[in-house]
Amino acid sequence: MSGRGFEEGLQDGDRFQVRLFIWSLEGAAQSILGPDVSLFEPGCVAQFGRGVQCAQLLVVGNAYILETFDTSSPDLVGHNAFRLAGEVWRIYFDPAPDGTRSFEDLESFEKGDPVAVYKVREFATADPVADVVWARNDQELLRSTPFTLRGVTVDFKNVAPRLMGLGHARVPQSDPNPQPIPTNEPPFESKGPGFFLLHTPISGTFSAVQSK
């Protein structure tokens, strides 16, 4: 999957959101939907190109920074480590994307009810010298609803009740158009209004560690 991360800041208590799209859903021997099946809607791609605007499986993940620390010393620039908390990921299925979705429009990701909801434990390490962030997480399915794509019905409780994820990003940079934090979504309610002041591109791979 690929997408964007939006950060309020990089200190304890700062809120964080990912907006991603899944572009491959693989089984043991081939794609779950069949050989060479795309997760971008073909008619949309023909008109608007391949990308988030035509993706059919979307992800929105919310969390906040529980704690962070720096391993630097006077003689060496170290790493910044982050432990996230309150994290929940929601997966949405869009049967007919119309080419208008963008990373800056949260509502365009959250159409309908999620087809899967995961609780997540995540840790990340940032290297400011290399300008890279590595993240790893463990996800446990809370609930799911079957959906049908290209004639194949998928239910995440059968495909991936537990996941392990590895992701990478660049160190977040200032967002010239800060996104408002959706305080009606957990775990963002308690801190009150604010803005995601930073953003960064994110990509990752998630593997099922338990399936039926």
Image (cartoon, rainbow, N blue to C red):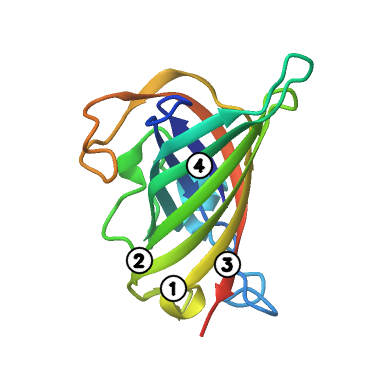
Foreground disc of the pair 2, 4: 4
Disc number placed over residue 83 in the picture, else none: 4
Of labels 1 and 4, earlier in sequence is 4
Q: Earlier in the sequence, mark 3 or mark 4?
A: 3
Disc 2 to disc 3, how far (Cα)?
14 Å
How crowded pointer 3 is (Cα within 10 Å; few <14, some 14-19, many 20+) is rated as: some
What amino acid is found at the position of numbered circle 1 in the picture? Phe
Q: Which residue is mark 2?
A: 115
What x and y, as percent, mark residue 15? 38, 33
Q: Tell me the element at label 2.
A: loop
Residues at marks 2 and 3 touching, judged by CB atoms closer than 8 Å:
no
User: CA gap, disc 3 to disc 1?
Assistant: 11 Å
Mark earlier in primary sequence (2, 4): 4
Up-down relation of residue 11 to residue 146 (above or below):
above
Can residue 125 be seen in the rendering of this structure? Answer: yes
Quarter residue 100 falls in: top left
Distance from the alpha carbon under mark 2 to that under mark 4? 27 Å
**204 on left or right of 18:** right
Please provide percent x and percent y for residue 54: 48, 50
Checking the image for residue 25, the label placed there is: 3
Cα–Cα span, label 3 and label 4: 27 Å
Q: Residue at x 32, y 73 (%)?
A: 145
